[in-house]
Amino acid sequence: MKLKFFIPGVLFLSLISCFKSESPPLHTGQVLNYKLALIQANAGFSPRDSGGELLFNDSVWLFGGFTPDRSNEVWNSPDGIIWNQMPTPLWEPRNMMGTIEFDGKIWLMGGMFLVLVL
């Protein structure tokens, strides 16, 4: 079994050593073997950090982030090569949020979304 992990906009990491319930636990200092491959140099969205990322329904999802302004953009891709921008959501632009799939839905929680200027 090969699992894929996502880094927004540029890389997929293919996990060569995969985790199974019968596998021994990981230990401090243990090294896993990863293979890096550039699959898309220009995904269509601006570079960002601290966005929310999630694998859901066989697609990679990217939420918000700091671009250097906070964003509420939502993008998804079935393969990491072709990216589709979703309609603008109702939530405030934010970064550093938590994302999780639960009960067949995407949940976005918290994050930084308010800037006070004095």
Image: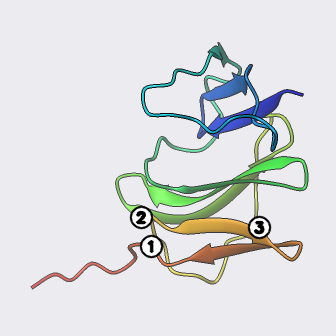
Q: Are marks 1 and 2 in contact (CB under 8 Å)?
A: no
Chain-order first, disc 3 or disc 2: 2
Q: Quadrant of residue 12 in the image?
A: top right
Residue under the point 80% across and 33% down: 3
Q: Where is residue 97 in the image (x, y as percent from the top left)?
A: 50, 68
Residue under the point 90% across and 48% down: 58
Mark 2 lies on residue: 70
- Judging from the image, what secondary structure is the residue with disc 3 in? strand
Q: Quadrant of residue 109 in the image?
A: bottom right
Q: Where is residue 24 in the image (x, y as percent from the top left)?
A: 69, 35
Type of residue at label 1? Gly
User: Would you place residue 62 above or below residue 44 in this image?
Assistant: below
Instruction: Give the number of the mark in front: 3 or 2.
Output: 3
Determine whether, in the image, residue 28 is placed left or right of residue 78: left
Q: Measure the C-alpha gap from mark 1 to mark 2.
A: 11 Å
User: Would you place residue 81 above or below residue 114 in this image?
Assistant: above
Q: Are marks 3 and 1 in contact (CB under 8 Å)?
A: no
Q: How many residues crowd mark 1 within 10 Å: few (<14), some (14–19), many (20+)? A: some
Chain-order first, disc 1 or disc 2: 2
Count of all numbered marks drawn on residues in the image:
3
- Judging from the image, what secondary structure is the residue with disc 2 in? strand
Mark 1 lies on residue: 111
Between 62 and 27, which is closer to the camera in this rendering?
27
- Judging from the image, what secondary structure is the residue with disc 1 in? loop
Mark 3 lies on residue: 101
Determine whether, in the image, residue 67 is placed left or right of residue 38: left
